[in-house]
Amino acid sequence: MKLSIVRVVLAVWGLCLLTASSGASAQLQSETTTRRADTPAVVAKHFIVAAAHPLAVEAGYEVLKRGGSAVDAAIAVQMVLGLAEPSASGIGGGAFMLYWSEKNQTLQTYDGRETAPAAARPDRFLDSEKKPQSFLEAVASGKSVGVPGALRMLELAHKQHGKLAWAELLQPAIRAAEEGFALSPRQHAFLERDAFLRDDPQARALFYDAAGRPKPVGARIVNSQYAATLRALSREGVDAFYRGPIAADIVRAVRSHAKPGDMTEADLAGYEAIERDPLCGPYRAWVICSMAPPSAGGVALLQIFGVLERKGFARAAPQSEPALHLFTEASRLAFSDRGRYLGDGDFVFVPLKNLLSSGYLDERARLITERALQIAPPAGFESGTSHIVVADAGGNVVSMTTTIESIFGSRIMVRGFLLNNELTDFDFLPEKQNSVGPGKRPRSSMAPAIVFGADGGVRLAAGSAGGSAIINYVAKTLAATLDWNLDIQAAVAAPNLGNRSGPTEIERGSAYEAMAGALRARGHDVRFIDLPSGSQGIERVPGGWRGGADPRREGVVRGD
C-alpha cells in the first residue's frame, strides 16, 4: 500500500512535536574515530548503491548511470548477488522491500516472503516420536523449501517503479555467469565448512573439485545454468520461473530429495507477492518505518526504540556501559514479545496495536532497572541473507533485505540457483503462533528500514543480514547514527551487541568486551560471540548521500 509519510508524521508525532523538531534530521553527522580506516564513508551527489558484493554493486551502479530507478538497480543487484554470493540470497528465496517515492512522497512495502506448500502441516518437522527434529536435519531437506517469492516481488515493484526494461536489468548477471567470476575468500570459507552442499550434484560440479574439495580462492566460477535461467526470465518474464520447465525442475528436485518435500507446480503457479501497509513509529525527532508481519523485524525495531526513548537512551554517553545496558534490555524485551506474539497476520491474530501502543511501551520501559532482566532463552540465528540499499537520481530509495535463510539454503541447486530452507523459520512444534500451515509465510526477523526526518524527507535507510540477530544489527545502526552521531559507515562498522531474550551478546574481539565486567555486575549473562552482521546503509547529507557497507563482509558502496 502507498502511505504518505506526511500523514505518518502527523499521526505518530502530533503537530506540536513536528514543529518543535523541525530541521533536526538535516544536521550533518560528525566524523568519529569509530570508523575503520579501510572502510571510509562514500559520499555521492546524485545516486548511490550499497550491497554485499562488489560485482553486484557495479551492476546496480551501471543501471543508475543509465537513468534506471532505485528498483531497477535493486533488481540488477539481486541477480548478481544470487550468482556471486549464493550462500546468502537469490531467485530461489524471498525478500522484503521498502520503496520511497520522492515525487509522490509515499512509502510502499512489498512482501516477497516464501510460503509453505498447500500440503504442509504443523507436524512437518517432528520425528517419528513426535519430537522436533534437529535444525540441521530439517534444513538439508526438501521439506525445508518454501515457495520462492523474490522474483514475484521484484516483478511487482518493477511494474510500478521500473524505468528500464526487465530484460536489460538481467544482463549484468548473465554476462558474469557466462564469463565467470572469482570465488571470494568468504564464499570459499563457507564451502569449506559446509557439510551438505557438496552432496548436491549440481553444486558439487560448480564449486568443488573431483575430490570434493572447494575450488581455491580466486578460481573462476562459470555458472552457465544460471545464465540460461536468467535468459529465460529475460525473454519470457517471471512467469518462466513459476510455470513451465523451470517450475517442474524445482518441484522435481524438492520431491526427489533423500528427505523429500511436497511442493507442487500448483504451489509455484499460485504464488503472489503482497503489497502491505508500512509499519511506522516515532523516535525522538524522527519516524522509523519498516516491514509489518510476517516480519517481526519492524515490530521489534519500533518496540526497541519506543522503550529506549522512554528510558532516556539519547542522554547516556555514546557507546558507554549504561548505553549498552539500556540497548540490550530493550532488545531483550522486544525478543520476548517476538517469540510470543509474532507470526503471519493473514493466518493468526497479531496484536500489533497493543504491542506498539504508548501504554504498553510505558509498561515495558518500566521493567528496565539498573539490574538485568531474566527472560527465556533466544532462538538461533543464521546468515543466509543479504541487504541492498539504493537511492536514485530522483531521490527515490529502496531498502531491501533478501534471503535464502541458512548458508546455502536447503543445499538443493536447480538450474544454477539454490533453493531456500525458509520453512525452518516456522516453530517446529504445532499449536504455536508461528507453526507451519498451508500457504502460510514463516515469521521473519528481516528489518529493512527507512527513517524520516521532521520535514518528511528521508534521513537514512539501512538493513542487515544475520537471522534473528538482524533486529539488533539494524537497531544498532540506527541508534549509532541517530543518537551517537556516527556517520553511516562508522555506524555499520561499530561493534554489534544485543539480547535475544537470553544472554547479552557482545561481538567477540570488539571494544565492548571491556565493559563486560560492569554489565555482569548488573546481572547480565554476557557472552562474547561472533556477530557477522552484513549491514548496509545510506544517509542524506547536505548536497547528496553518504553510504556505508559492513566491513565484516565483502560489500562496497558506489555512487556519483
Image (cartoon, rainbow, N blue to C red):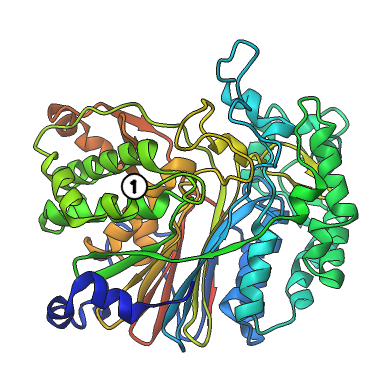
Foreground of the two, 152 or 491: 152
At 22% from the left and 36% from the top, the residue drawn is 514
x and y, in percent, of residue 539 in the image: 38, 73
Instruction: Tell me if residue 451 comes above or below residue 517 in the rendering.
Output: below
Q: Quadrant of residue 243?
A: bottom right
Q: Which residue is mark 1?
A: 495
Kind of element beneath mark 1: loop
Instruction: Say left or right for 175 vs 283.
Output: right
Instruction: Say left or right for 449 vs 203.
Output: left
Instruction: Say left or right for 553 vs 514.
Output: right
At 21% from the left and 44% from the top, the residue drawn is 324
Mark 1 nearby-residue class (10 Å; few <14, some 14–19, many ≥20): many
Foreground of the two, 359 or 495: 359
x and y, in percent, of residue 216 in the image: 75, 41
Foreground of the two, 65 or 154: 154
Instruction: Say left or right for 37 vs 65.
Output: left
x and y, in percent, of residue 444 in the image: 49, 46
Instruction: Tell me if residue 96 comes above or below residue 416 in the rendering.
Output: below
At 45% from the left and 37% from the top, the residue drawn is 433
x and y, in percent, of residue 437 in the image: 59, 38
| Residue 106 visible in the current orientation | yes
Instruction: Tell me if residue 414 comes above or below residue 210 in the rendering.
Output: below
Q: Quadrant of residue 283?
A: bottom left
| Residue 415 visible in the current orientation | no
